[in-house]
Image (cartoon, rainbow, N blue to C red):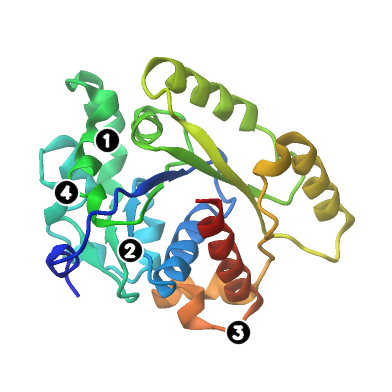
Amino acid sequence: MSYKDVKRGLPQRDAKVVAVINQKGGVGKSTTVINLSACLGEGKKKVLVIDFDPQGNSTSGYGVEKEELEHDIYDVILHDQPIEETILPTCEPNVFIVPATIQLATAEIELVSAMARESILKEAISRVKDDFDYVFIDCPPSLGLLTINALVAADSLLIPIQCEYYALEGVAKLLESMQMVKKRMNPSLEIFGVVMTMYDSRTTLSKQVVDEVQSYFGKKMFKTIIPRNVKLSEAPSHGLPVVMYARVSKGALAYSKLAKEVVLRG
């Protein structure tokens, strides 16, 4: 199914735009984007993933061949490429993706001189958000201009936090940036939720970190906790979400449960 097929005859939806963000790398950000979107798609939600990270992990995790791309999010941000012309189908019929390549890494510098540089992504998303239930922005692990664009474009933030020592390190800075954007450019920006990732039930540390994050974020923390799971690690190398690669694995079951929580949260 192509993007044009999505548009044909469907009611307007006005998507919830969620920036999946943490300035620390390796916390399960792209893993969460890929697998949460796939599970929501299985639940008949129309989802758009915008890969906004130069590493392009969401792009490769959905099996998109970067070398064969004609256009990607870089062209949307810096070359006025219509976003609808960059949207690709994925292996999950209800999930579509705007891919990214390493070329996006130069965008931070090139955006400095751009007009209305902080709101370019928001403007692009506005062209297609009525066609989807959710738009997930996979943010880079930094607080530069790309991330500011994501914060301006989003309705809310989903923050994955790894169950490890110093888990909350940097989160205060992220929340500070969020408050700055909320005050100056996006007054409706809120935290949608916090999800704990890479949980190892065998360690006391994982349990202590969950308790610490729970006391910090309270009800913003999702009840579903994503475990460390071999199948979650293997799935991206096959270009598949874990729910398609290993449906009954602990990782797949956890993300399916998280997707139900996301829907209930609105």
- Looking at marks 4 and 2 on the same chain, the residue that comes earlier in the sequence is marked by 2
Tell me if label 2 and label 1 are in contact, CB under 8 Å.
no
Residue at image location 36% in from the left, 30% down from the top? 152
Q: Name the residue under label 2.
A: 46
- Looking at marks 4 and 3 on the same chain, the residue that comes earlier in the sequence is marked by 4
User: Residue 231: percent from the left, percent from the top?
Assistant: 58, 77
Residue at image location 68% in from the left, 66% down from the top? 228
Task: Point out which mark residue 83 bears.
Answer: 4
Q: Distance between the Cα atoms at labels 3 and 2?
A: 23 Å
Q: Mark 1 points at which residue?
A: 122
Q: Distance between the Cα atoms at labels 4 and 3?
A: 35 Å
- Residue 44, quarter of picture: bottom left
Image quarter in which the N terminus is found = bottom left
Q: Mark 3 points at which residue?
A: 248
Tell me if label 4 and label 2 are in contact, CB under 8 Å.
no
Q: Which residue lies furthest to the right in this view?
A: 204
Q: Which of 103 and 35 is in front in this view?
A: 35
User: What amino acid type should be assigned to the residue bearing mark 4?
Assistant: Ile
Q: How crowded is mark 4: few (under 14 residues within 10 Å), some or many (20 or more)?
A: many
Q: Distance between the Cα atoms at labels 4 and 2?
A: 17 Å
Q: In the rendered view, would you say 191 is above or below 10? A: above
